[in-house]
Image (tube, rainbow, N blue to C red):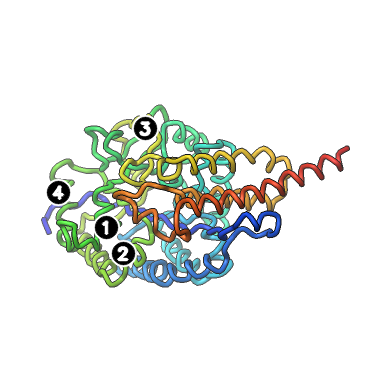
Amino acid sequence: MRSEPMPPICLYLHTHQPRRLKKFSVFDIGAHNDYFDHDANRLILDKVAKKSYLPANRMFLDLMRESRGRFKISLSVTGVLLEQLEAEFPEVLQSFKDLVDTGCCEMISETYYHSLASVYSRSEFEFQVLKQQKTIKKIFGIEPKFFRNTELVYNNNIADIVSEMGFLGMLAEGWDDILGWRSPNFLYKAKGSPLRLLVRNYKLSDDVGFRFSNREWKEWPLTAQKYAEWINLLNIDSKAQTLNLFMDYETFGEHQWEETGIFEFFKDFCRRALDHPRNKFTTPSRLADEMEPAGELDFWRLVSWADMERDLSAWTGNKMQQAALEKIYALEGKIVEIGDEELTDIWRKLQTSDHFYYMCTKWFSDGDVHKYFNPYESPYESFIAFMNIYNDLKIKVDNLLKEKAKVAS
């Protein structure tokens, strides 16, 4: 390694598993009350916990202890996943709590239901964010200061809402057509807002998150020494303030299996980085407290971290997705009027963005990503099952409203 120090490394990991739906047929409409495939959800979460969450959490905890707190991470865990962990996998939830209890792990907030409510309903978005805040407070005993929207969906309008809700800062994708000549390796502020903004270095993040085990990649195999040298160059070339590595938690053990060497690579890299006394891992709130923004970023359009386009087309790119999203959010007024807690929770779980992702028909460079953990044979099968569930739910909603009107009269 070179003798020059690295920029502070801000490692953020996103953790989520949806409540997958049953393959609901037209003949099930009016005949069943449960829309969720509990057996499949339990089996998948058990697999991911054993392959990823538990071994990754052990690795992070070991790094925190052996570095005496110099290794730090930030993470978010969706409310729908926390529910499942609390009910069925308490030992996994405890392993996340152990990380937070060290003081070396910052919790980042997001939407409880991993939804696209920020695009479709401000009131629903604000409810889900507040519900997530309360859940994090209850489970982990802290109130997150930074926010990460579902799939890093972000624009100036969303930044204004998040700022008004009292957050210190937000995470976003460091996409080229937004940054222009600017580097992702600095702290910024949102346009016209005091909200601090950290944007993902997508190249160095995806080198680990997506390309690590790809033998066709010209840089394969990626070694800890090579990766550290790339990061050192950031300081030499641009005097970077930070290196923002944002990726899925499942990178460790699930997207990149243990057999690929991902755990050994990461431990070796962290140890090499921390060999230099001036190198450090940091968290979003620490960066925001310690640094002044290098400038203001204008996210004039919606940007996400998904696919080659970095837009919302992974969830809204075809007529099926658009129809399904419009239908489910159109129920909001009726759901609110009924005020039934259980029914409302079901409606919100149907907003989870994964359901619409499974309907995606983009099958080129990102095709395998859309197949991952997809319980359906095709996007069309996903759409049909979702719409059958929607129609069943709508019948229930309309019947409840009729009963309510009769009582009122």
Disc 3 vs disc 2: which is toward the camera? Answer: 2
Q: Quadrant of residue 196?
A: top left
**Looking at the image, do the residues carrying marks 3 and 4 touch, with CB atoms under 8 Å apart?**
no
**Mark 4 = which residue?**
233
Hey, what amino acid is under mark 4? Leu
Hey, what amino acid is under mark 1? Val
Across and down, in percent, residue 245 comes to 30, 51
Classed neighbour count for the residue bearing mark 3: other residues with Cα under 10 Å, few (<14), some (14–19), many (≥20):
many
**Mark 2 = which residue?**
256
* Residue at mark 3 to residue at mark 4: CA–CA distance: 27 Å
Across and down, in percent, residue 375 comes to 47, 61
**Looking at the image, do the residues carrying marks 3 and 2 touch, with CB atoms under 8 Å apart?**
no
**What number is the disc on residue 348?**
none
Classed neighbour count for the residue bearing mark 1: other residues with Cα under 10 Å, few (<14), some (14–19), many (≥20):
many
**Looking at the image, do the residues carrying marks 2 and 1 touch, with CB atoms under 8 Å apart?**
yes
Image quadrant in which the C terminus is located: top right
- Sequence-earlier tag: 3 or 1: 1
Classed neighbour count for the residue bearing mark 4: other residues with Cα under 10 Å, few (<14), some (14–19), many (≥20):
some
Across and down, in percent, residue 69 comes to 33, 62
Hey, what amino acid is under mark 2? Gln
Residue at point 54% right, 43% down? 324
Taking 20 as reference, is 336 left or right? right
Taking 176 as reference, is 106 left or right? right
Disc 2 vs disc 1: which is toward the camera? Answer: 2
Look at the picture and state if 293 lies above or below 279: above
**What number is the disc on residue 208?**
1
